[in-house]
Each structure stands twice: as C-alpha cells, then as structure tokens.
Amino acid sequence: MPTVDVTVEVCGMAGDGTIAAGAMINEALSRGGFSVLGFDSYPAEIRGFGRCVTRSRIGSETIVAMGTDTHVLISLNETEAKSRISFLAPRSVVIFENNPPTYVHHDASFVAELPPDKLLYGMPLSDLAAEAAGTPRGRNLTALGGFAAICGVSPDLFISVVESKFKTKGEKILSSNLKSFEAGYTYALREFSDKKGDAIQFPELPHNDRMVMLSGNQAIGMAALDAGLKLYFGYPITPATPIMEFLASTLPKQGGRVVQMEDEISSIGAVLGSFYAGARSMTATSGPGFSLMTELITHGVMAEIPAVIIDAQRGGPATGLPTKTEQSDLHAAVFGGPGDSARIVIAPTNVSECYHYTIKSFQLAEKYQTPVIVLTDFYLDNRVENLVMPLASEAETRNANVSPTGSEGGNYKRYQITESGISPRALPGMEGYIFTATGLEHTEKGSPDYSPEVHTAMSEKRHKKIAGALVDLPKPEVFFVEDRLDVGVIGWGSTFGSVLEAVRAVREKGCRVGALKITSLSPLHASLIQEFMERCNKTLIPELNYEGQLANLIGHLHHGSVVRLNLVTGSPFPPSLIIRKIEDLIDRGDI
Amino acid sequence: MARERCVIIGNGPAANAAAVALRQETSELDIMMIGEETFPHYRPHLLPAYVAGAISKEDLFVTPPSFYEKCNIRIRLGQRVVQVKLDQRELVLSHKEIVPFDALIIACGGRQRIPERLQIFEELLLTLKTPADAQRWIEGLKSAETILIVGGDLTSLSFATAIVSAGKRVTFMLDEESFWPLPLSRDLADDVKQRLTRKGVEIIEASCIKRLTRKSEDVIEVDTDTGLIASNLVGAFYGLIPNVKFLVRSGLDVERGVLVDENLRTRFDLVYAAGDCAQIYHPELRDYWVSIGYRNAMEQGKIAAQNLSGGMISIAAPPASIFCAEGVMVNTSWWMEF
C-alpha cells in the first residue's frame, strides 16, 4: 500500500464556507481510514472580514503534527489565497474559481502569481453550484466535489458526511448541498480526464467507522461531562469559548448548569464556591482572562479549595493575537499571582490527552485541594484529530475528596498539618464540622494568624502537598531510549507532536536523537527530567514563546547549556524547523 | 515608468527560443510565457523513445525551472489564452484574467489532428503529443500485447519501430489521410511500408476505418474496409494542426495558421508568429508555407524575437525544400530527417 502524507488546505474569506469545507475533508478522509489532523486559522472579527484557512494533514500512518508544505490548495477566494502560495509544495494541486463575476487584471490575479510547476484545476464553482442547486452558496461543496474527483477520493465518503451534517436541516438543504457536491465531482471528472494521474491520488484504505473527529476543546468538554461536572462558569474568550458552547448544549441534559458570568473573576469565584460546597465545576479562559483570575486562584491555594481551570493560551501579551497560537502563559500558569502559591499545572500534548488529563484534573484538584490548571493552546484546542472515542474508566472519574474520618470529635482541624500536607476536608453540611475558607494565613483550625511560625509551617505544608502530587501526575515520557544521545529534544503542549515527528525524521537518517515529553509542568518530575538531560550532549527545547519559558523552568537541572528554539509566529511549530536545528547542532560537531 | 512587457503564447520550441533570444537582446523587458500544457519545455520527438523505455522522463525535458528564474523570464503553465484583443493590447485567459502586453509572439504550436470521421471514437484512440499522452501509452502497454497504429505521420513511424523493439506486436494501417501535411503518393507509401516491414511492423492493406468498438476492458475491435481487427490498443497518428482557433476573432489574418511575412511579422505592430502555428510568406513562391518540426520552430522563434528587437531577418527556406500538400506549402525539418 502506498504511503500517503498529504496536506490539504482550504482558503477563503470569512463567510465562504471555508471552515465547513475543511471539516468535511477531515471527516470524509477519517471515515476513509486515514489518520487526520486538522487545524483552522480564522480572523478575530466575527464575520465578513479576513482570511480563513483550514489545513488538513492526511496520512496512511499516524499524523502527530502539522507540516509546513501544502499539497492541495482549494481556493474559495483568490485574493486571500495569494498568501498561501509560498506554502505550496512542488507539483501541488490548486483548485480555484475560474469564472469570477468580473474580469481580473493581471496585477491582482492569484493565478498569475502561481509558480509554473503547480497543477491548476480551474472550475466555475459558483456557476456549477448555482446551476445544480439554484444558489451559489454551495460552491464550497462544489470545490470539494472537484477535490474528490481530482485526487481520487471516493465521493461516497463525502456524500455520507454531507448527509450526516445536513440531515437534520431538512430535505431541501440536504439535497441542495448534495447537488452542489455532485456538480463539482462530475465536472472535474469530465473536464480533467486528460490530467488524470497528474495529481496526488489517495489510495483506498479499509474504512474505519470507530474513529471520530474530535477537537481539543470538544475532548475537554466531553471529559468534563464524563467526570461528572455539575457546574460550568465562564466568560467567552477565544479560544476557550467552544468549551462553554459544547457544555451549554450538553451539560443541562445531564442535570448540570452552564452560567455565563459577568467576567473571569466571578467565574473563578463561582468555581471555587462550587468546589467548596463539594460540586465539581470548571471554568475555561485564555491569557487575558487567566490574568484576571490569578488572585482568586491563589485564594484557592491558600484556602485549599479545589478548582479546575482551563487556560487555552493564545498569542499575547494583553489582548494580543486572539486567533493565533502561542505557549506563553506557562510562567503565568505556574507562578502567576501573589505569594508562594504552588499549584498543579498539567499540559496535554494531543486531543486524547486533552480528554484524559481534564478528567484527571478533577481528581487532582479534589485530592490535593488546590486549583489545577490545564494548559492548552489555540492550536491544540482547535485542531481536530481522528481517534477512537475516548472513554474514562470508573477509577478515573470517582470522587477523590479526602474526607475526615469522623473520629475528630469536636477537634476538627481543617488545615491540619500532616505528613503528606493533605488535610481531610469537610464539606459544608457535614454534621459536626466547622467550615472555614480563608485567604488569610491561618492556623490548622483556620483562624487568621500571621505569626512567622504559622506562616512558615503552612507554607511548607502547602508546598509539600503539591510536591507530593507528583505520584499522581504523568511522568515525563522518553521516546527512543538510548544510553547516550547527541541531541535530546524536550517538548510540551501542542509542540510535542512536532518534536516527535522531527526526532523520528532525524533518526531515520541514522542520528542518535531522542525526545522527552513533559506534561506535568508544576510540580516537575525534576529528577527524571535531569536524568534525561544528562544523557544528552545537547538539549533542545522548542517552544512557541519568545523567551523559552520551559527552558527557564528546567534549564538549571542540567550542567550543560540548553539550546532554545523559539517561535512567535502565531502558527504551530513546523517540524521542519526542529529538524533543521537538530541537524545544525549535529553538524556543528561540538557534541 | 512600468517596464514594457512581451508576452509569448506557447511553451514549445519556438516559444522558448523566442524567450531566450529576447532576453539575450535586452534585460529591459518583462518576458512572460503562457503555455496551455502543464509540462515544462520538452522534446516531443523523443516521446516514442520514452514510451519504449529507451530514455528516462527527465531526458524529455529541455530546461529546468531554475533556468527561467535565472533569465528573469516569467513562465506560466497550464493556463490558456482564450482571446487576443489587439486593439487594446490585451490577452484574456480562460480564468478571466486580463494580461496587458506591449509586444506579442504567438508560438502556440499545434494540436493532435483526428480526422472528422473518427472524432466520435476519440475516447478509444490514443495519441502521442505530450508527456501525458506518453504516460497513457506506458500504462496501456504494461498489459497490451497487440497495438494497431492508424494514420502514419512522422511520429508514428518512429513510435511503431520503438514499441516493436520493446517486444510488442504492432500492426500498421497506413491511412490515405495519414501523411498530412505531406502528400502520400503511391511511391512514398510503398517506401514507408517497406521500411516499417523491415523493422518488424506488420502492414495491413486496409485504408479506411468504419467503426471502433470496445469489446472488453482490454480489446478494441476495429471495423475496416477489409475486415475486423482486434487490438489491445489503437493509436491515432494524423499529424498536427495549428492551434489557432482562439485567434479567429482577433483581427489577425488566420488561414491554416497565422499569416506572417518573411520576417514573421503579422499586420499588427510588434505582433509576431513563429513555429507550427505560423504560415509564412515566401517571396519567391509568392505563397504562404507552414513548417513542421522542432528545429524549424526553434529557428523561427529566435528570428521572431530578434526582429521584435529591431532586426530584419528573413526566414531562409529554399523553395526546393518546400512541399505542396493539400494546397498548402510545407517545410518540415522532421521530414528531412526521416
């Protein structure tokens, strides 16, 4: 079976149906048995302005990262598509509108700028859609029909996706979309028969109906539901809003509530209040909202109240780049807020981990009575992967509260200093207990006390508790274990997929390189990370931030220097850059 | 001030020779080539050898993309000119793009000719004009044992012998229309038959095809004036016709090709034609002649460019080398080689 690794891009203006077309490509090819990783880039404005781009990397083997090159470009807006020309691979396929409403002067023409090696497939998309369905609105479907015919994708895959997507919207809309698709398919099959075989062809693979397409945000929402979420409090912000949207349509059916709060401060306050009362709750936000939450997060640390907070990072600082990806909240997540406020920060690296680590975060929060921050980013939240529907076990979802045994009599100490630092927590309503929750430094019983002895002892208790959480946090995972490595690459969050692909590629050339995935960012498995770094002649840490925030956290663990590779383009980390850097380090010969 | 732009329609030997010659003449000109085919400049006369596996695909191609970049020649492939507006000095491409030009060289070559009576069977016929055609032959020949070639242009002769040498059984039906643009006299036909027979090609006496029918996935039945022939593949080789249909309403004088004087000028200022699509005036013959063949095309492309840059070079074709075919005067570099 031929190996396929193709990136398909749809580019249009907001309102062209670009994102919908990309989603249908993902779904169709997933049903066709391919591994799919999709990612959309869209403008910060609501509608009518700006460029929308969807990228779908489709492979016959598991895809873990988004590549740089595009092999098929479907243009729904030629002006916007101009910006994508530089990403086109040699001999790539370009499907475009060849009968625009007006003539285009050479200086403004998209086609004029295409390099000569590109394979052009001009189609009268609007005309075909209008003729087939009575309206040109389905021209995105017509373009998909063209794509299927040109690249040898079975039309049945798309037809089944269109049927699933539109069957609830009435026969007329379903029929209109199917006709638009079929018009494009038939046209391309007929008009481009002489070019058959020029374009990339997708082989037929065994279909896999068990796979579902899930985004990081959907996985987080599903995980929260499966974890028994009772209450969600949030304030809309890109890229976290889809979590609230998902839960708004699902949580009430399970007896829960979604409440849109007036801001992020009230959101975290309500989450702390819910957990204080014993109900699992959650909030999701992004950098600007997270910064507003920090005081109350530290309140959770001090008062030892659980909370689950999703920080979906985007480009910053401040309002920054709302619809671009970045990993620059790491310092804020680990350290942000007043005082020594140790907390748990966990960062999934793919959609499956978004699910499992969100589930885990509820138990961690309950057991260690502290806010848990799940650190994702725009790319991870919005990218879709096809995977077997994740399902949490009973053990993953069960209540992890550490409750008092009842033997305390009238001497219950809410903040009792214990060996582990974990104090049994009585929930309001439990008979015979006094319930305290104070942001002031306090004694074991919860009474305010600012004495040096108490503050020292309580600070130590809280930090010991968090350090002890390491036993429940995922260990760093080593890929390609060897005694000595020329270059060891450490990755976290959405960048890890790019790290893994790069390391695989360089190893295929015979180089001794390995990768380390870190998902627990606070507390850190310092000794395991150190052990890996000491086996590496050079340690490379690629991150989507300017300074190298993970490098700042772990650089001191190793006697040698850590090489930082930082990117703040707002786009996912291209594996090719990491490959180049690894090869550069090896070629320099100083390892 | 914007630089002046010369557009060259085509990407064959005449067009490429014109582009290179123009660049040699001046660096102060935007040169844009617009070719309908998606392939970079290739040698069509090597296609038979490529199909037979005697040369690699890379050997077909003449100039790498980097060459154009180095020469600052902009090349656009897979894009079709549908209209030439000479009064506005503009071209219209099939995707509704308007390209202004100051000077124009038409070197769009020819396309495969299928006689009208066979056009309804076109789906069953393979041709050999482009690398894509060659690819289809290569795919077909993987399982084909018997090949029928009808027509008999210059390409077919080298192709038939090439695939015989590749171990295939080739039957040749020399059609009376086959030698366009050359006349197929009885003597010439006998000469061709003898040459082909010597090389292992079976000649059949039929001269006319009535019908083609696909009998199965890999068998085509050909009904001829002398009986039925079954073959795995059928190739049609009837020569080329100038690809000038899009020029019909341009105001240019178009007969079989674009009419130009001996300096390759049309009647419009700074508009030239060269190669297979041009019909050139010969003062001695007092008539127009067309040329066929890679070498002729290159020579004409170069001269058109030199004249566009201020030269006054005439096409040198001795009257004796020009044939009269179907009322058209023809000079072919391929024929001279055959």
Image (cartoon, helix red, strand yellow):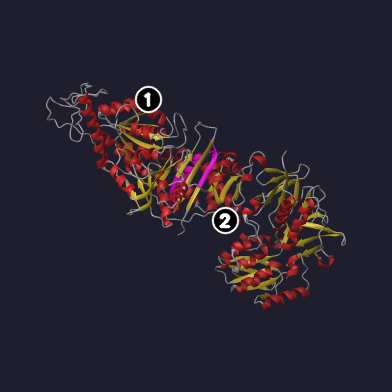
Q: Position of residue A310 (x, y in %)?
A: 36, 34
Say if B57 sits above or below A519 in the image. below
Query: Observer-nearest residue: A574 or A36?
Result: A574
Residue A22 lies in the magenta-colored region? yes
Q: CA distance from mark 2 to mark 1?
A: 55 Å
Residue A348 in the figure: left or right of residue B125:
left
Query: Observer-nearest residue: B39 or A517?
Result: A517
Which amino acid does the dot numbered 2 rest on?
Asp
Say if A190 sits above or below A138 in the image. below
Using the image, name the chain to which the residue with label 2 belongs: A
Which type of secondary structure does the marked residue at label 1 adopt? loop
Residue A581 lies in the magenta-colored region? no
Which type of secondary structure does the marked residue at label 2 adopt? loop
The total of numbered circles placed on residues is 2
Q: Earlier in the sequence, mark 2 or mark 1?
A: 2
Q: Which residues are magenta?
A: A8-37
Q: Tell me, for residue A198, which label it has, or none.
A: 2
Residue visible at 16% across and 25% down in the picture: A431
Residue A126 in the figure: left or right of residue B281:
left
Q: Position of residue A475 (x, y in %)?
A: 29, 44
Dot 2, how many residues are within 10 Å of its Cα: few (below 14), some (14-19), or many (20+)? some
Dot 1, how many residues are within 10 Å of its Cα: few (below 14), some (14-19), or many (20+)? some
Check chain identity for marks 2 and 1: say if they share one.
yes
Residue visible at 62% across and 54% down in the picture: B65
Give the residue number, with chain letter if any, for mark 1: A261
Question: For residue B47, what is the image quadrant?
Answer: bottom right
Question: For residue A270, what is the image quadrant?
Answer: top left
Residue A226 in the figure: left or right of residue A144:
left
Q: Is residue A522 visible?
A: yes
Q: Is residue B293 visible?
A: no
Q: Tell me, for residue A354, which label it has, or none.
A: none
